[in-house]
């Protein structure tokens, strides 16, 4: 049986790669980047509860940053939908 912390390490590594992909999308003001950031922030928030094993978690910096990313991406999704692609 695979220990839970190893599963969380793999999910965290995948999330890191996807944050890089989202950064490229944000740079190009792509609407999908906002939705990807929303999904990744939710994974991070729920992952914190799973990692600590309780609903009454200790608030850590990554938890606060995930909420900030979630709120900013939620607000940016409309703006990115109306963005005109920039020519390079």
Image (cartoon, rainbow, N blue to C red):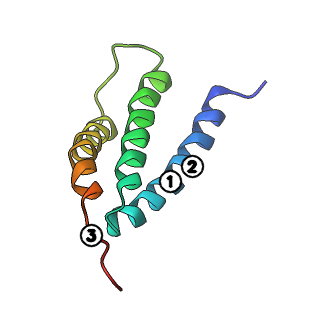
Callout in the foreground (2, 1): 1
Which comes sooner in the sequence, label 1 or label 3?
A: 1
What is the spatial separation of the Cα atoms under label 1 and label 3, in whole angstroms? 24 Å
Q: Quadrant of the image for the C terminus?
A: bottom left
Q: Position of residue 59 (x, y in %)?
A: 28, 28
Q: Quadrant of the image for the N terminus?
A: top right
Q: What is the secondary structure assignment of the residue under circle 3? A: loop
Which comes sooner in the sequence, label 2 or label 1?
A: 2
Tag 2 residue: 13
Callout in the foreground (1, 3): 3
Label 3 crowd (10 A; few <14 / some 14-19 / many >=20): few
45, 79: nearer the viewer: 79
9, 74: nearer the viewer: 74
Q: Position of residue 78 (x, y in %)?
A: 24, 49
23, 56: nearer the viewer: 23
Report the residue at 58% width, 35% height from top.
8
Callout in the foreground (2, 3): 3
What is the spatial separation of the Cα atoms under label 2 and label 3, in whole angstroms? 32 Å
Report the residue at 38% width, 45% height from top.
35
Report the residue at 44% width, 54% height from top.
19
Q: Position of residue 58 (x, y in %)?
A: 31, 24
Tag 1 residue: 18
Tag 3 residue: 84
Q: Quadrant of residue 43?
A: top left
Q: What is the secondary structure assignment of the residue under circle 2? A: helix
């Amino acid at each position: 049986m695979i220990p839970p912390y190893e599963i969380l390490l793999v999910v965290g590594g995948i999330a890191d790669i996807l944050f890089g992909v989202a950064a490229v999308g944000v740079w190009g003001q792509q609407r999908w980047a906002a939705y990807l950031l929303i999904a990744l922030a939710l994974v991070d928030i729920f992952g914190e509860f799973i990692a600590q094993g309780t609903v009454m978690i200790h608030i850590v910096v990554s938890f606060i940053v995930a909420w900030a990313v979630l709120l900013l991406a939620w607000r940016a999704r409309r703006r990115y939908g109306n963005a005109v692609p920039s020519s390079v």
